[in-house]
Image (cartoon, grey):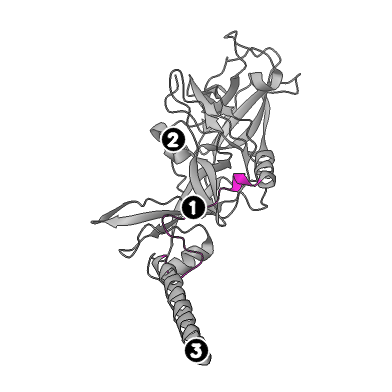
């Protein structure tokens, strides 16, 4: 009897383990047969919960939060406002954005974009070449927080193959609590979620800012840069920038103004939000704000530019790319 009882117990235990395995397999099937593809109710762990990773990101994002103020410069003879989001390499890195088909068109899917580089990584750049990833009818809000997850999603029929576009956008990765000023009486702009190597991070994608302040850069093969002319007197090493000089140059009570002159504004064909930085030396008598447009610095000679003297003494490409989206709601 004892042997029979043990045998029955062994059989019952085997059945129980088999059923448990069935349940585990069923749960795996529900998220798409992949440990990389997550069910809709599974949290993607925020990178910032790791203190060391958060510190590394904070030290390398180039931003001085928690609130990035609106600064002023000039375009076409008038004052404009912009955010200073640091610098950028001339190269671009991918961003995968998730879409769904709707009729003959498309709409965003309820899924954060995916990136594969953040500040502190060797390859990081806020200039992003866009890959579109369409979800299929099988998609049940599963999450794809890594490149391996996208590969598995395609294999499982949850996603279509990513499509590289000839479009670039501008997305600067930062901490969750770094906000962009949005003008008087307006709520500051918070970053939006993205996925990065299985973790959740946050970024200011300027193509999502009010008024297309960071519209797509649309040149084949490489990101497009506008021109930003930073002025300084010939007898001074620093540019006309109140933040650099720690002075109120125009008497308005703040230190947020500069005499940078941009060659395009929001809505212009050449506007991209990333700028090639030109060092423009002006004569020693130049006064802040005397020139507010490119036509005050250069004469256009066919496809080239001829410096006006005065005020320009000399100018050169600094080889620096600055990330300065213009605020569409500015003065």
Residue at coordinates 43% horizontally, 62% vertically from top-left? 162
Q: CA distance from mark 1 to mark 3?
A: 43 Å
* Location of residue 177 (image quadrant): top right
Main SS category, magenta section: loop
Q: From the viewer's perspective, is the residue at label 3 or at label 2 nearer?
A: 3
First to last magenta residue range? 31-50
Q: Quadrant of the C terminus?
A: top left
Do the numbered discs 3 and 2 sit on residues whose CB atoms are within 8 Å?
no
Numbered tag placed on residue 110 in the rendering: none
Q: Residues within 10 Å of mark 3 (few under 14, many from 20)?
A: few
- The answer to whether residue 88 is above or below residue 15 is above
Q: From the viewer's perspective, is the residue at label 1 or at label 3 nearer?
A: 3
Residue hosting label 2: 209
- The answer to whether residue 227 is above or below residue 151 is above
Residue 106 horizontal/vertical position (percent) = 30, 53
Residue 206 horizontal/vertical position (percent) = 48, 38
Residue hosting label 1: 43
Residue 96 seen: yes
Residue at coordinates 43% horizontally, 22% vertically from top-left? 186
């Amino acid at each position: 009897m004892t042997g029979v009882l043990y045998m029955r117990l062994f059989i019952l235990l085997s059945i129980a383990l088999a059923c448990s395995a069935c349940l585990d397999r069923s749960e795996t099937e529900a998220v798409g047969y992949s440990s990389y593809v997550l069910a809709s109710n599974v949290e993607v762990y925020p990178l910032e919960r790791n203190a060391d990773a958060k510190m590394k990101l904070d030290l390398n994002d180039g931003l001085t939060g928690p609130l990035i103020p609106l600064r002023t410069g000039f375009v076409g003879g008038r004052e404009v406002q912009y955010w200073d989001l640091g610098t950028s390499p001339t190269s671009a890195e991918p961003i995968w954005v998730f879409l769904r088909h709707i009729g003959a068109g498309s709409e965003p899917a309820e899924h954060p974009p995916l990136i594969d580089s953040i500040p502190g990584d060797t390859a990081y750049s806020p200039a992003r070449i866009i890959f579109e990833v369409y979800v299929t009818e099988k998609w049940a809000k599963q999450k794809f927080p890594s490149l391996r997850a996208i590969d598995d999603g395609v294999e499982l029929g949850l996603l279509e193959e990513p499509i590289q576009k000839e479009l670039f956008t501008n997305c600067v990765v930062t901490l969750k609590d770094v906000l962009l000023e949005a003008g008087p009486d307006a709520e500051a702009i918070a970053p939006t979620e993205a996925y990065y190597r299985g973790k959740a991070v946050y970024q200011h994608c300027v193509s999502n800012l009010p008024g297309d302040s960071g519209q797509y850069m649309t040149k084949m093969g490489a990101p497009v840069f506008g021109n930003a002319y930073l002025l300084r007197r010939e007898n001074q090493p620093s540019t006309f920038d109140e933040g650099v000089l720690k002075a109120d140059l125009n008497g308005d009570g703040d230190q947020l103004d500069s005499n940078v002159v941009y060659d395009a504004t929001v809505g212009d064909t050449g506007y991209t939000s990333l700028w090639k930085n030109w060092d423009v030396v002006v004569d020693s008598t130049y006064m802040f704000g005397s020139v507010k447009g490119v036509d005050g610095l250069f004469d256009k000679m066919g496809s080239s530019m001829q410096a006006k003297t005065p005020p320009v003494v000399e100018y050169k490409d600094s080889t620096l790319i600055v990330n300065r989206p213009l605020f569409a709601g500015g003065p």
